[in-house]
Amino acid sequence: MASTSKKHRDFVSDPMGDKPVTDLAGIGTNLGARLNEAGFNKANAVLGQYLVLQRNEYRFTEWIQTTCNANSKQAKDCFNCLNEWCDQFL
């Protein structure tokens, strides 16, 4: 896998807990606010959607791009972050 950001590494190193959506790689303040408006105020809610979409990269990245107007890099970064977190903790 390509090198990851510090934000990605920090996220996947700890249990989910009560992390805000902005702790997810690829999700900054603006996208976090849009996810909040869509009812996804915590990282575990986005994780739930990721699992509902059966950990499918195409379906998840399409969903997050549509939901909060993420670009393809942001969507991919978020997917990779959740995917690695699941590999680590589930």
Image (spheres, rainbow, N blue to C red):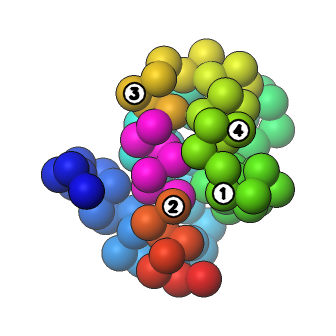
> What's drawn in magenta, residue-wise?
76-82
Residue 57 picture location, percent across and down: 59, 45
Q: Are marks 1 and 2 in contact (CB under 8 Å)?
A: yes
Residue to which mark 3 is pinned: 73
Left or right of 7? Residue 49 is right
Q: Which percent across, then down, holds residue 81?
A: 44, 55
- Whichever of labels 3 and 1 marks the residue nearer the N terminus, that label is 1
- Residue annotated with mark 2: 83
- Measured as percent of width and height from the top left, residue 52 is found at 82, 56
Q: Relative to 9, is 16 above or below?
A: below
Give the percent coordinates (x, y) of residue 7: 30, 52
Is 22 drawn above or below residue 10 in the view shown? above
Report the residue marked by disc 1: 55
Q: Nearer the viewer, residue 72 or 20?
A: 72
Q: Earlier in the sequence, mark 3 or mark 2?
A: 3
Q: Quadrant of residue 77?
A: top left
Residue type of the residue flagged with mark 1: Arg
Examine the image and state in which quarter residue 35 appears.
top right
Element class at badge 2: helix
Q: In the picture, which quadrant includes the C terminus? A: bottom right
Three-letter amino acid code at the position of disc 4: Arg
Marks 3 and 1 in Cβ contact (< 8 Å) = no
Whichever of callouts 4 and 2 sits on the residue coming sooner in the sequence is 4
